[in-house]
Image: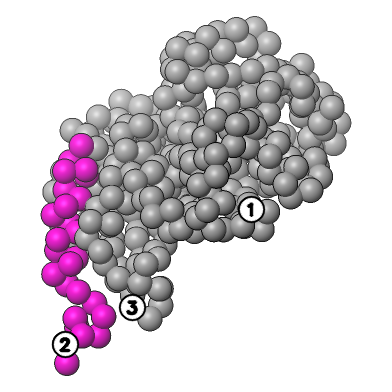
Amino acid sequence: MDYKNAGVDIEAGYKSVELMKKHVQATMRPEVLTNIGGFSGAFSLKKFKDMENPTLVSGTDGVGTKLKLAFLLDKHDTIGIDCVAMCVNDIACAGGEPLYFLDYIACGKNFPEKIATIVSGVAEGCKQSDAALIGGETAEMPGFYPEDEYDLAGFAVGIVDEKDLITGKEVKPGDVLVGIASSGVHSNGYSLVRKVFPMEKEKLDTYYEELGRTLGEALLEPTKIYVKALRSVREAGVTIKGCSHITGGGFYENIPRMLPDGVKAVVKKDSYEVPAIFKLLAKEGGIEEEMMYNTYNMGIGMMLALDPKDVEKALKAVEAAGEKAYVVGEIVSGEKGVKLC
């Protein structure tokens, strides 16, 4: 009896590392002091010593049950983008710049080519956010996960000068809400998605005119990464007073997280076009509108609260970063919360 007969293939682990090296290397930053394969990752902070009060910000998350679609469609090259996005978007939401990322893959059986494909998506997400992939772990856990399934989670660290932290404390009545478009469902609400649509390959491979692609392609569309768009807004001289990453809990849970007491957000539903995937989901599932806005991003992945004088500059800055943004509402006096009208 040996470890391989027990279900853990050490040689496959070695091969996975070799296959993923080229993807990891593409994410490197000058501050990275270690190579892949070490026991830890080291990152120099010397570059940031001139900040008044350098402050680390962190985020951790997983992809959730969106992975089930990747299993069904045997498509694993973009799911890593989702994992990175869920972490670095939270960091960017606080005004931080992501520095580095670590991933954790737990699987029933280590198929080196599949693991390397997953990591290629993680690396792509890191490149989109200018974060270095400085470490990770692949845990082969036979008997715990089915052989063809895995879980994927990650952890990111970023930095911001304390004076530039986005806290929402200065948000006040009269401020304007600007929403940055999402790429689709992102990485939340898939337990409901899986109740609405049959999780069968034939259904996921069905082409929908309103989507312009198959259902599976629409649902596996990677989460948008907003790091560069928010950086562009700041570099345009705009102060982001409040920022909310619209994840699980949709508008109703996430927007109030950027609000101080005594104000509420008023969002105009007709201020932008809700993407077709959400309309299809609501129709097929008979889901009420309030539940949709309480579960999904509904086409807005990041919400900003801005001084009215900064709105035009912010819109142009987001566009210059290659994203779409809309004026979607305003801040008014009242009990903290969200009103859709």
Observer-nearest residue: 241 or 273? 273
Q: Is residue 9 magenta?
A: yes
Residue 44, position as x, y percentages in the image: 22, 39
Vertical arrangement, residue 77 with respect to residue 110, above or below? above
Name the image quarter holding residue 39.
bottom left
Three-letter amino acid code at disc 3? Pro
Position of the N terminus by quadrant: bottom left
Name the image quarter holding residue 142.
bottom left
Residue 286, position as x, y percentages in the image: 79, 48
Name the residue located 68 percent from the left edge and 28 percent from the top edge.
274
Visible in this render: residue 250? no
Observer-nearest residue: 216 or 136? 216
Crowding near the residue tagged with mark 1, few <14, some 14–19, many ≥20 C-alpha atoms within 10 Å: some
Nearer the observer: mark 3 or 1; the answer is: 1
Three-letter amino acid code at disc 1? Phe
Q: Earlier in the sequence, mark 2 or mark 3?
A: 2
* Residues at circles 2 and 1 in contact by the CB criterion of under 8 Å: no
Q: Is residue 42 left or right of residue 182?
A: left
Vertical arrangement, residue 47 with respect to residue 286, above or below? above
Crowding near the residue tagged with mark 3, few <14, some 14–19, many ≥20 C-alpha atoms within 10 Å: some
Distance from Cα at disc 2 to Cα at disc 3:
14 Å
Observer-nearest residue: 210 or 176? 210
Residue stretch in magenta: 1-26
Tag 3's secondary structure?
Answer: loop
Nearer the observer: mark 2 or 1; the answer is: 1
Distance from Cα at disc 3 to Cα at disc 1:
30 Å
Return the residue at label 2.
Answer: 2
Q: Earlier in the sequence, mark 2 or mark 1?
A: 2
Residue 99, position as x, y percentages in the image: 33, 38
Return the residue at label 3.
Answer: 142
Crowding near the residue tagged with mark 2, few <14, some 14–19, many ≥20 C-alpha atoms within 10 Å: few
